[in-house]
Structures are given as C-alpha cells and as structure tokens.
Amino acid sequence: MGDLPVLQQGRDVPVCLSNAELPDFYMGDYSVLGLLVADLDRAHRVLAGQQFAVHKKSDHLKVKIDRTDQLPAIVNLLSRNGIACGLADIVDQVYQG
C-alpha cells in the first residue's frame, strides 16, 4: 500500500521529499499525510518492537503500511505507550513551476 512518514512534532527542519515522490502533474493543494509524534526515538523503538517494518531516515521514520487498518493500530499503539501523536499534512511548501 505505501509508507507512512513519521516525524517529530515541532520539527525545525522540514523533511525533504525527493522529486521522484511527486506526481508528474500536481496542483497547489498537493499534500502528504504523515504522523507527528512527541518522541521520534521512542516511537521508533515501540513500532519496531511490535514488528512494524520501520525504516529510520536522518530526520524521520517511514513505516510500511500494507492494510488500511494498520494506521489506527499504529496511532493506538503509540498512544498506549504514552507517545502523543496526530495525523497532519507534512508538506510545508512545494514549488510549482
């Protein structure tokens, strides 16, 4: 199905999305759904400990999602482990030339 980007809440540096990830034709309302968490390192440990496929990048995580029911399961798992989280549009700016 795809990857869910997981980012630290209140991050100072925006995540850089590769141009390969942008569709060929997009409008100004392009967005990417991601999960903002209060503690990225703890979220990594919790998700990896529950056997989610997690790939750690320098500034965020990518969690492989195979089924739609995994998204609420991830949010519930993090919440049960005391990690505040929420879904958000993680694209701050996209140049449209």
Image: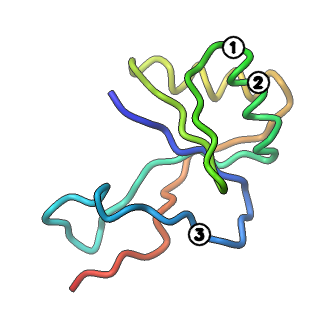
Proximity of marks 2 and 3: CB atoms separated by less than 8 Å: no
Whole-angstrom CA distance, mark 2 to mark 1, is 6 Å
Asked if 8 appears above or below 70 in the picture, the reply is: below
Q: Horizontal and vertical percent for residue 95?
A: 32, 81
Q: Residue at x 27, y 74 (%)?
A: 28
User: Badge 1 is on which residue?
Assistant: 50
Quadrant containing the N terminus is top left
Mark 3 is on which residue type? Pro
Instruction: Tell me the element at label 1.
Output: loop
Q: How packed is label 2: few (under 14 Cα within 10 Å), some, or many (20 or more)? A: some
Residue sitting at 72 percent across and 53 percent down? 8
Instruction: Residue 4: give x, y in percent of width and height.
Output: 49, 38
Q: Position of residue 60 (x, y in %)?
A: 63, 50
| Callout 2–callout 1 Cβ contact below 8 Å | yes
Residue 41 vertical position relative to residue 54 in the rendered view, above or below: below
For this rendering, which residue is in front, 92 or 79? Answer: 92
Where residue 39 sits, quadrant-wise, is top right
Task: Name the kind of residue labelled 2 in the image.
Answer: Val
| Residue kind at label 1, given as amino acid type | Gln
Q: Is residue 47 left or right of residue 92?
A: right
Q: Please state if 71 lies on the left or on the right of 27 as rendered.
A: right
Q: Which residue is mark 3?
A: 14
Closer-to-camera residue (15/36): 15
Kind of element beneath mark 2: helix
Looking at the image, residue 64 sits to the left or right of residue 83; the answer is: left
Identify the residue shown where x is 51% and y is 27%.
71
| The residue positioned farthest toward the bottom in the image shown | 97
Q: Which residue is mark 2?
A: 46
State which quarter of the image contains the C terminus.
bottom left
Residue 21 numbered tag: none
In the image, residue 48 sits, relative to residue 87, either above or below, namely above
